[in-house]
Amino acid sequence: MDYKPIDTLGIKDTEQLRVMKAGLFDLVSLRVSQNSRDEPTLLGLDLVGASPNYATGRKVSKAYFDTVDAQLQKQFNVKLLAVWPFGPQILFCKKPISKLADIKGMKVRVYDQNLAKFIELVGGTPVPVSFADTHQSLSLGVVDCAITGPSSANSAGWPEVTTHQLPLGFQMALNGYAMTMKSWSALKPDQQAKLKAAFDTLSDDIWKYSEELFQDALNCNAGKDPCTTGKKFKLVDVAVSPADLELVRSAVTKVSLPAWAEVCDKSNPGCSQKWNATVAPVLSQK
């Protein structure tokens, strides 16, 4: 493997499908929501509210995997090999909150349109801010709250400028591994099977590790033990209520699915129909 990190290449993470289609790379670690402007079908893996926890996130990504794979092959000549999570994206605030509804009237840092629409539904004001600028935006009061994973927040020092964390997952922040069909087709059937098995094992390992890291980072942020991966802070851990869980789940039918379906069906007719046939049954299981 000739491995090249994206930050040394001068290529944006929103351009990954394009560089693969152009044949510049054989294999890419693919950001899901970041590339969904080029291929809206991708976002069906990670709609706001669909995956509030790891178990559901895993089922959703498996249920929709083949639909995404088929569309990437058709549009970009790219094969999807695996899907894995950064982990639940949760809420950090510099003002006291005891439930999700308390963000009403507050400015909340978001990173995509799907999430922005959900924050509006709850009564907050979504503000798009890049991850790199969020610490300063919280510090200066440009935003009152911000959303990311607990480990990312810890390493970026968000608990220095916030007081509360609400560990309610809005999205799973999924990523994938993708390979050009040209490179895939050049492999013999036994090589393809070996490679796919290796990626299956890798994604299994990442799903497990991500869950361990999520819990550890929550502990670190709140100053609890065990805390082995990050720095200890003293955030207030806000308990997730059944009402808040229900509110996030309701986002699927109220906001994220209709907004996404409209965009996706334009570029990939029948895209939301496939989602309803494959993912909806998973979400109706209690």
Image: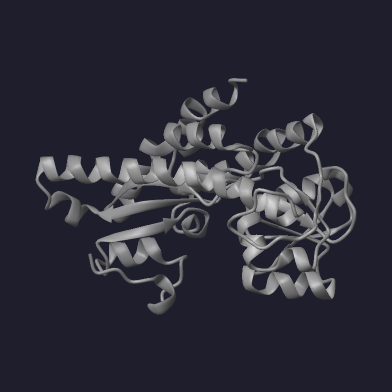
Residue 220's place in the image compared with 265, above or below, is below
Viewer-side residue, 59 vs 69: 59
Viewer-side residue, 279 vs 75: 279
Residue 166 in percent (x, y) is at 76, 47
Residue 251 in percent (x, y) is at 70, 38
Residue 251's place in the image compared with 87, above or below, is above
In terms of image quadrants, where is residue 130? bottom right
In the image, is 3 to the left or to the right of 224? left
As drawn, which residue projects farthest toward the left? 188
Q: Residue at x 47, y 65 (%)?
A: 14
As drawn, which residue projects farthest toward the top? 285
Quarter of the image containing the N terminus?
bottom left
Q: Residue at x 79, y 69 (%)?
A: 138
Quarter of the image containing the C terminus?
top right
Q: Residue at x 11, y 41 (%)?
A: 189
Residue 179 in percent (x, y) is at 27, 54
Residue 149 visible in rendering = no
Residue 80 in percent (x, y) is at 33, 47
Numbered-mark total:
0
In the image, is 16 to the left or to the right of 163? left
In the image, is 276 to the left or to the right of 247? left
Viewer-side residue, 91 vs 251: 91
In terms of image quadrants, where is residue 47? top right
Q: How is the image coloured?
A: one colour
Residue 142 visible in rendering = yes
In the image, is 268 to the left or to the right of 201? right
